[in-house]
Structure formats: structure tokens, C-alpha cells
Amino acid sequence: MSYLTNPYRYVAPECTFTYAGLDYDFSGDGTVPAFNLVSVELSQDGTKLYIFGNQVSDNYSGYQYTLSTPFDISTASYASISFPFNSQSADIRGSAFRLDNGETMYRISDQTGNKKCFQYTLITGWDMLTMSYASKSMSYTGFATSAKDCWVADSGSKFYCCSNTAIGEFDLGTAYDLASGSYSGDSFSFTSQDSAVRGFYMKADGKKCWMRGDTNDKVYRYSLSTPFEVSSMSYDGTEYDIDISAHGDGGFGMYMLEDETKMYVGDTSTSEIFQWECA
């Protein structure tokens, strides 16, 4: 399924998220050691799952899984594919893929003296077995002194980083190329909802943004009146409560389908990913 024909690109009616009873515990599958989960990603066709950690004993690695049923986290199996990020950072956090083909990936560092986003190339889209460091990075210190997650616009002309309290917008002079990036000076504060941001995700058309907050254990939704321009962002009053201790209320990482029918949240304390669905 191509990205442009993906039905998950479109927005569904309003709903309430409930735990779907679907989860995956990657600490006990015999393939990946328990680590500090900080980010969750899926391929656009829903057949691949990626988890990213932030632990020195694990070389700050990312792991690739196969979903035998697309978008069903309970059908995950380890694909025996991993990639260490320790050569770039000793405190690495969120991640993002280029959405249209999966041929570029980014991770963000929160290491003291190394406040940068790093860029990676995948020869075969969405296949981490073919991934290598592109030797390209971008400092985000003009925006914040600490960062937790990142995202790249569908056009490749915008890049976003989030700190504990805000989201910042960066311009990329060359599409998808961090080496051409610079801070635009535009940002939006999340503090009216939560001051411990642990992940965010933007809709491919740049009109919606979701933020996961750790203080209140909720996911909040925002609207952008001008697509991709965070200066036009506002809280639209929609929030999803994930405050259930057994189902992902602690830690980092979130992923939202474009139609808001499924949401995935990581729990650092239990080394699990939980699937929530629109009811």
C-alpha cells in the first residue's frame, strides 16, 4: 500500500479512546533486553513496528518488528534487525521517519554538549537492516536546552523538535536534509496542558498535532490554522486519558494513526507498548 493511498491518512469523527486489550511486551520475548523505551514508530502500511531505547547497556539501539496483522500490536514478532545509535549520542530520545517512503530516519539527542538531531539513510525504505548514519545533524539549541521527540513534515521542508514544555519549528533549505536546517524562531508552549512532554506526533497534512504529557497522563490534540506553522497552533479542547497504570501511563513514546482510530503508547517501566482504539 502506498503512502498516498493509505486510508489511515484521513481524519475520522470524534471518539473516546479505550484500551483495546492489545499489547506487546518486548522485554520478555527472548530477543531484546529490557531497556528504557523512549520512542515508538510504525511503517505507513502497518506491517512494521519500531521501538527505540535509551540505555547504555543496549548501545541506545532501535529494533524492528513485523506485524502479521497490520496495525495490530499483539501480532508483533522480532525481525532480528537492530541498529545501535551510541556512536551519535549517549542520551538519545525520540525518532521520526520520512513518511512517504521510509528512506530517511531521524533521532534526537538530549546528551549534555550534544544537543542535536541526527539523520539516517535507509537504502530500502522502512528496512532498518539497510540503515546507516548519513553524517548529517542539526543543533536545536536555538530553540531549547533539552529535547524529547522530533518529526519531519511530509514535504521535507519543515522539521520539529519538542522540549519538556514546547514544540519548535525548523526550516530545511534542502528537503529532508538536517544539514540545511535552521530554527525558524516559531514555537508553541504546551504548559497550559502539561509541562512534562514525553512525545508528539503531527498529521501528514500539517493541520493536527497530538502531544503526550506525563504529568496528567493524557494525550492532547491541537489544531494548526495554517498547516505546518506552529505559530498558528492552538489547543482544540480534545484530550485522551491514558491514566491506567496497567496500560501505559508511564514513560515515553506515542504514535497516532492519521484517522485517530488507533493510538500506541510506550511504558518505560514495564517495557511494553499498548494499543488504544477509538470507541
Image (tube, rainbow, N blue to C red):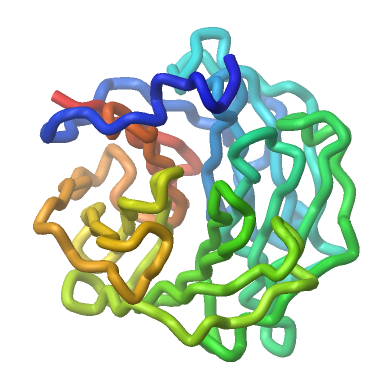
Residue at left 73%, top 89%? 113
Left/right of residue 91 with respect to residue 123 in the rendered view: left
Q: Residue at x 29, y 50 (%)?
A: 249
Is residue 43 shown left or right of residue 196?
right
In this view, the residue in front, 163 or 78, is: 163
Q: Give the answer, above or below, for where 234 lies relative to 53.
A: below
Which of the image's four quarters has the N terminus? top right
Give the x, y percent position of residue 247. Answer: 29, 38
Counting the numbered discs, the total is 0
Please name whichever residue, 104 or 37, is drawn nearer the observer in this view of the structure.
Answer: 104
Expressed as whole percent of the image width and height from the top left, the position of residue 27 reads: 58, 36
**Residue drawn at 38 percent across, 33 percent down:** 257
List x then y, in percent, for residue 40: 52, 43
- Splitting the image into 4 quarters, where does residue 276 fall? top left
Query: If the image is split into quadrants, where does the C terminus sit?
Result: top left
52 over 12 or under it: above or below: below
Q: Is residue 93 left or right of residue 113?
A: left
Q: Residue at the location (79% across, 71% down)? A: 179
Which residue is more in the foreground, 214 or 32? 214
Q: Is residue 267 visible?
A: no
Asked if 77 appears above or below 38 in the picture, the reply is above
Res. 159 image quadrant: bottom right
Q: Position of residue 224 (x, y in %)?
A: 29, 60
Residue 110 is at least partly visible in this image: yes
Side of 268 where 41 appears, left or right: right
